[in-house]
Amino acid sequence: MAVVNERKQVIPAQPVSTAPTLRQQVSERDRLTQETGHYYGITELSLRDADPIKYERFYNKLHAAVLAARESARFVAASPGSREMGECLWGITTPEGDTLAVSMGFLSHTAIFPVAIRYMADNDYDVNDGIEDGDVYAVSDGKTGGVPHPGDFYSFTSICHDGEVLGWAVGINHLMENGAPVAGSWATFSVDTFMDGLVCPPMRTGRKLRQESWWKAIWERRTRASTMNILDDKMRLAGCAMINNAAHELLAEFGAAYYKRAIREVIEESRRMIVDNMRALMVPGTYNGCAFRLVKYEGLQNVWSHANKNTLIHVRASVEPNEKGLMLDTEGSSRWGYHSYNATPGGADAAVFLGMINSFAHNTKVTAGIELAVQRHYALGSIYNPDYEFTSNANLWAQTVALNSIGFNAVSRATFARGYMEEAFTVDGNWGAFQGAGTTADGTSYGFTNFEWLGGTGRGAWCYKDGEPLVWAAWSQIATIGDAEEFEACVPPLFYLGRKLLPGYFGYGKYRGGPGNSAVHWCVEPGKHVALTRPNGGLSCTTSVGLGMSGAYPGPGSFMISARGTNLPELIAEGETPRDARELMAQVDSGQLKVESLEIWKTDCPELALHDHDLFVDAAGSSGGWGDPLDRNPALVIQDLNDGVAPDYAFVSNMHGVVATQNATGDWVLDAAATTAKRAALRKARLDDSLPAADWWQQERAKVLAKDVVPEVHEMYSQSLSFAKFDGEFRRFWQVPADFSFSKE
Amino acid sequence: MAGEAQISKELIGQLIEGTIDDDNTNRLQRLPRKDQDRFLNYVAVLQSRVSWTDQILLRLGDRLYVVRNAAGQRTVKCDCGHEFGDYRQNWKLGCKVRVRRTLAEMREVYDPAPACPEPGWQEVREFFCPTCAAQHSVEVVAPGYPVVFEMLPDLDKFYRDYLGQPLPDESPDWYADRTEALTQRWAAGATG
C-alpha cells in the first residue's frame, strides 16, 4: 500500500504495525508468569504432548545451532582464551531475553541475558529508532547489561520476523584486554566504573549482521589488545549470524505460530524438570555458608583518597529449598565499596548459576527455567545490589566465586545427607591469572591477559575420594588448562620456566582436595617496558570459603611471588631453575637463587614492572578437603609422600597422625604401630588444647563486646550488621546489649 | 518409577567406605534419574554400622547424625555415641573448640607458608567431639564471627513431602533454630 503526495512522489506508508513493542512483550511475559506460576502462562505442554518428535526436532535444531556457532566461530577468528579454553558462549533467547539454548562454554552467563534486553525495552530501543533483523548490540556494562565484569563482552543480535522481535542470538567471550587504567581484563584497582575500561551499556554497533566501520576504531583506540579483540568481535558476530540464520530456517520450516509457542514450552518444560530435580536431590531446610575476601588498597590509592583503605568483604548466603525450587539469600554480605569487587544482580547471577545449572539442569534443556526455579535475594545497598550507580565491577569474580561455592556446597551437603554421595564434593577453588601491558623494543604497544589457569583447577575432595587436579573449573563448563605456548606467543617477553602442580597445596582432610597449580614466568628481553598485575579468584589472606566440609580444611587461596633482580643466568648454566613456588622459595632460602627484591603477595599486587631475568611466580587453583584428617587412610598418606603430592613429612605426619620411615631407596614406609599411637596422642591433644564451646563463647563474647578486632573486621561487622538478617543472627549469637553497635563512634 | 536403577546396599557401603571404583562412581553419576529409595537404603546401611540403636533420621557429616533417641528426642549424635543435644540448636556449640590465631598455628594446617590465612583478619576454628575428639567441622572466619549453623533440616517436610513417609512425631516446632536458647543461658551465666 502506498500514498501519493501532491508532487506525485511515491512514499511508502509507515506500516501500521500490529507487532507488540519490546516493552509490551516483557510486560506480558511477566504478567503471565506471575499470575500462573508457570512460564508465560504455559500450563500444558501441548506441542510436546501432541507430537513429541516434532517438538524435540525443533529444540534439537535450536540447540544444534548454538553448538555449531561455538564450534565454528572460535576457529574462524578468536583469541587463544576463546579458542583454546571455555571462555566463550553462544545462546539463543526469547524476545525478552530468556534463554532457550546455550552452547558449551561458560554457561552461567545465560542468566544475564534478560538484563540487557529489559533495559532496551524499558528505554524503547525498538521504538526509537527501531530494531530490525540482524541488528548488532555491544554490551559490557554491569548495571544496564548485567555483565559480570567488563572483561566479559557480549554481542546481542536481533532475530525479527514480520516486524516483530522474536528473539536474540548472543555471543560472549572474555577479552584479552579491555582498556582500563589497570591493563588487562580485570581492572583490580578500579575505584568506580569510570576506571573499568570499555564499559558499554546496550548500544547498536552494526546492522544486517555486519558491524559498522566506526566500531573497529573503538577497539583500536580504547583497548590495548585491539588485534585480538577485533578477532573476538568477529568471532562473536559470526556465531550470532549462524544462529540468526538457523532461527529463520526454523521459522520457515515450522512456522511462526509454532515457533512462538514452542519457545515458551521448552522453558516451562525445563523449569518443571529443574524443580523436580531439586526435590529429588535436596533435603529441605536451611543451609548457611560464608566466605571472606580482603581488598588491600591502603597506601596504594593515594590519588583517590576515598578509596585508600582496606576492606574485608563478607560473603554470606543461605539456601532454602521451597515449593518453587529454592531461595538463595545473600543478606548480611558486605555493602558495596570504592573497590573493584562489587557485583550487580546480573553479575551475582553469573556466579550463582554456575552451581545451580550444573546441579539441577543436567538432565534437561538448559534454558531460563533454572532462573525461575532459583529465587535470589540481593539486598539493596549490598555488594550484590549497590545503591550507587557507578560502582566498579572489574574484579567481582574474586568474591562471587565464593558466593557460588556457598550455594553449590549447600547442594553437596544435601546430596550427602540424602545418600547420593557420588555427587557430594567440596566446592571451593580459586583461579590465578595475570595481566598487563608492555612496549616492545620496536615501540609496539600491547596489552594482555594470560588466563591459562582459569581453565583448570583442583577439584575439592569428594566425600569418598580425593579431589583431582586440573579437571575442574567452577566458572566454566569446560575444564582445560589451555595452550601455554599460545599465550607465550601473545605475551612477548614472558616465558614459562616451569608449570606444574604445587605439592602440598590443598585443603587437608580424610580426603584431600585436588592440588593447585604453580607456574614460574620468566621475563626475557622485555623491550622498552612490561608490567603486570594479577587478578585472582581469591587470595590466600583468606581461604576460598569459610567452612570446611565434614571436618576438613577449606582450600587455601592463591598467592604470587615476584623475584626481581635475579642471578637466573647462573642457574640456567647449572640447569637448576625453579619450576614452582615451592622450589623458588627453597632456592632463595638456600642462597642458590639470589634475588634483589623478593615479594610474596597474599593480596592483589600493584603493577609490577619486570626486567630481564625477573621472575613472576603464581600459585592458584587449590581446593578443599572432606572429612577429619585423622581419618585418612595411612596408605594414602604414604602414597602422597612417595608421589611427591604432599612431600613435607613433618607436616603430614602431624596433620594425619601418620608415622613413616624412608627405606634404602628413599621410599616412605608406614610404621603402623607408631601411627596408631600418634593418632591417639593427637586426639588427646585436641581435647587438651581446646575449650568447651561455652567457655570459648564467654571469652570471645568479651572480645566482641570490647570490639577487640582489627579495623577491617570492625568495619566488616559495621556493614553486615546494617542488614537486619545478619544483625539479628549476630545479636542472638553473642547476646549483646540492644545498644551494641559496630558503627563508628 | 519405570526403568529406575536399583542401587545395592553393597554399593552404598562402598561409597561410605570410600572403596567404590571409578566405573561404578561414573555409573551412579550418570543416572538420568536417581534411585528414589536411596535414602532409606543409605540410612539402613548407616544404621547397621553404628554401635547404638537410636534411629538415624539424617546424616549430617561423616560421623554425625540426627537421631531419635530412646527418650523420643531428636538429637545430634556422634558415631562414638556422644550426644550433642537438640538438633535445632547448632551442634557446634556442644563441641570443644580450638582456635588457631597466629601464623605459626595456621602453618600447622596450611602448606606452603604463603597459603596461610592472615592472622587478625582470619582465624581457624576446629570443632571436636568432646568424647572421641573427632574433628566434625572447621571454620576459617573473621574473629568475632558467629559460629555458623551449617544446616538445619526440615525433617518433617523431608519425610512427609519428599519421601512420602511422615514421621510419627510431626510438629511445627521441629523446624526452628533454637540456638539462642543456649546462648541466652550462657549469657545468664550457665555453662551447660
Image: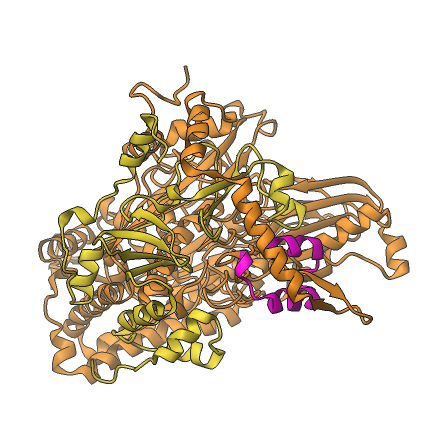
Chain colours: A orange, B yellow
Q: Position of residue A30 (x, y in %)?
A: 16, 53
Is residue A371 depicted above or below A483 in this figure? above
Foreground pick, B34 / A534: B34
Give how far across and how far down residue B3 sits, in percent: 25, 85
Q: Quadrant of the C terminus of chain A?
A: top left
Magenta stretch, residue numbers: A629-657
Magenta segment main secondary structure: helix
Q: Residue A575 appears in which quarter of the rendering?
A: bottom right
Could you say which is closer to the camera, residue B185 or residue B108? B185
Residue A155 inside the magenta-drawn segment: no
The residue at the point 18 percent across, 69 percent down is: A265
Q: Position of residue A277 (x, y in %)?
A: 26, 67
Please indicate whether residue A187 sits to the left or right of residue B47 in the image: right
Q: Quadrant of residue B190?
A: top left
Residue occupying the far top of the picture? A745
Residue that appears at 63% across and 64% down: A637
Q: In which quadrant is the N terminus of chain A drawn?
A: bottom left
| Residue B138 at x, y percent in the picture | 48, 48
In the drawing, does residue A625 fall left or right of residue A655?
left
Is B23 placed above or below A516 here?
below
| Residue A612 in view (yes/no) | no
Of residues A130 and B40, the one drawn nearer to the viewer in this rendering: B40
The residue that appears at 38% across and 60% down in the rendered structure is A412
Q: How many numbered markers are drawn?
A: 0
Please give left or right for residue A437 compared with residue A686 in the image. right
Verify whether residue A636 appears in magenta: yes
Q: Residue A228 occupies which quadrant of the picture?
A: bottom right
A631 vs A66: above or below = above
**Can the viewer see residue A362 in this picture?**
yes
